[in-house]
Image: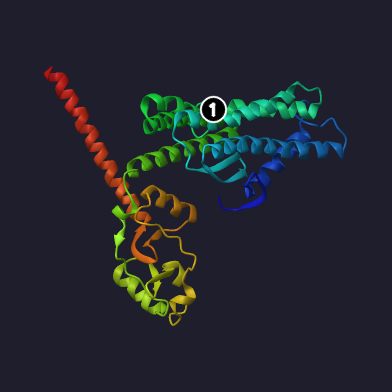
Amino acid sequence: MAYSIRICRIFGIDVKAHISLALILLILSYVFYVNKPPFGFSDLQNPMRLIYSVVMAVSIFVAVLIHELSHSLVAKRFGARVREIILFIFGGVASIENLPKEPKKEFAIAIAGPLASLVLSLFILTPHRFLHLFGYFNLILAIFNLIPAFPMDGGRVLRSLLAKKFGYVRATRISANVGKAFAIFMGVFGLFYNIWLTFIALFIYIGAVEEERAVTLEGLLSNYKVGDVMTPNPICVTPDMTVRDVISLMLRQKHLGYPVVKDGRLVGIVTLKDITDADENDVVENVMSRKVIAVTPETKVFEALRIMSENRIGRLPVVEGDRVVGIISRSDIIKLAEILEIFEGVKSSREKFGSVQSDTSG
């Protein structure tokens, strides 16, 4: 997530704060400052009133962090890679790669967060007003996250239960549709009672759509490797070519990026972005990107797409050893997915039509 800074590292996981976190901390601190007990500290005198308000606002996001860490640690136990946890205006999100698709493992990962929040909610039983309020918010966090709607934990719990019967992709579609329906209801409700709920509903709806799209894409592309999709023997440039030469090449070939090869070895990549403001007489070596992320022909297509998305790049060189054997772009993958989706739709229609004909003839 852009505009995030690392604040600490816990159990080998980077914890980052998005810029929007500062805004919500200010809002929450103000709410606790002006509200009466039991949901605020307006009865206290400063500076304790201000200190309690700020610390309570921060403690809510400490609880969110514990919630996300619980997901992450269980996921790591099952072999997944946790890149980072980001705290932002709507709570927190753990970026987990290679999530297991086995229903039991997904259930364990999904339920870990709400269970951690439920444990923290036991503070509600204490007489200390600060801890009591802290426990109350953890109880709300646990209950809210258990609502069976993507992208919340309850949606993943629902998918893990449905996947046993319907399979992972169809279970995702059902859970995503539940999430979208819940978001629409919540959004309309929020328009009349609390506009903040409408913003949260929008976040839920977008999350449900993205989850459904990602799983659908992965399902469509699961049988394809980069070698099946890449453009073989791509046009390469050399470090000593001028920017003018590259511009001329782009105008002729209509491609926006080229691997840079020296003595048969990949040393960089040059794109339209690299040369936009460069001197036309300068050489490629001075403007190219040296940090090259490459894949092999055996890399899964969906994995290549994930790498592009994470690094915000549009294409990847394909190498065998040090030799460039191809190039794959985001547009190549999206076009493949669109074609496969159409074929899947046609196949499904034919199967349904054939079933109807069989029922009619019977």
Q: Is residue 241 left or right of residue 20?
A: left
State whether residue 60 appears in this view: yes
Which residue corresponds to the image point at 82% horizontal and 39% vertical from the top-left?
51
x and y percentages locating residue 287 in the rendered image: 48, 74
x and y percentages locating residue 348 in the rendered image: 24, 33
Q: Secondary structure at mark 1?
A: helix
Which residue corresponds to the image point at 38% horizontal and 34% vertical from the top-left?
169
**Furthest residue toward bottom:** 281
State whether residue 277 appears in this view: no
Answer with the quarter of the image where residue 324 lies. Answer: bottom left
Answer with the quarter of the image where residue 199 lies. Answer: top right
Quarter of the image where the C terminus is located: top left
Q: Nearer the viewer, residue 99 or 244?
A: 99
Which residue corresponds to the image point at 47% horizontal and 56% vertical from the top-left?
312
Q: Dot 1, crowdedness within 10 Å: few (<14), some or many (≥20)?
A: some
x and y percentages locating residue 341 in the rendered image: 29, 42
Which residue corresponds to the image point at 60% horizontal and 25% vertical from the top-left?
143
Q: Nearer the viewer, residue 296 or 355?
A: 296
**Furthest residue toward front:** 321
Answer with the quarter of the image where residue 161 lies. Answer: top left
Query: Which amino acid type is marked by label 1?
Result: Phe
**Furthest residue toward left:** 361
x and y percentages locating residue 213 in the rendered image: 40, 40
State the residue position of label 1: 189
Q: Nearer the viewer, residue 280 or 31?
A: 280
